[in-house]
Amino acid sequence: MNVEQPSSGFWLGPIGQISQNARDLERAVRFYRDTLSLPLLYRAEGMAFFDAHGIRLMVARAEREEFNHAGSVLSFAVPDIRRAYQQLVERGVHCPQPPHCVA
């Protein structure tokens, strides 16, 4: 597939990670690992990471209560995360905090 790069110089790469909230992390780990048979890559405080056939799935407790709702977070690969963040802010995207590394 030939993808045209936008003239603005800003583009999103492929999805690098999907994040799913879990109120009960241990139950979620058992579900994704044991029921769905997704390989558990590693765990960090409040998070578990699985290999979903080449896409990383992060199952985690929400960082803040306002984010504790059903839904997924898509993480796109970008060449320069700080530059991409700045460009999104300049375009009017509300970001509660600058990007930070979680894995």
Image (spheres, helix red, strand yellow):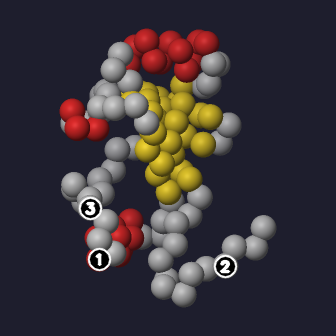
- Dot 1 alpha-carbon crowd within 10 angstroms: few under 14, some 14 to 19, many 20 or more: few
Which mark sits nearer the N-terminus, 2 or 1? Answer: 2
Residue 52, position as x, y percentages in the image: 62, 34
* Quarter of the image that includes the C terminus: top left
Q: Amino acid at mark 2?
A: Glu
Between marks 3 and 2, how big is the CA–CA gap?
Answer: 27 Å
Secondary element under disc 1, as helix, strand or loop, is: helix
Secondary element under disc 3, as helix, strand or loop, is: loop
User: Residue 84 lies in what quarter of the image?
Assistant: bottom left
- Dot 2 alpha-carbon crowd within 10 angstroms: few under 14, some 14 to 19, many 20 or more: few
Residue 50, position as x, y percentages in the image: 54, 31
Q: Amino acid at mark 3?
A: His
Residue identifier under label 3: 94
Q: Taking 23 as reference, is 71 above or below it?
A: below
Q: Taking 4 as reference, is 7 above or below it?
A: below
On residue 90, which mark appears? 1
Secondary element under disc 2, as helix, strand or loop, is: loop
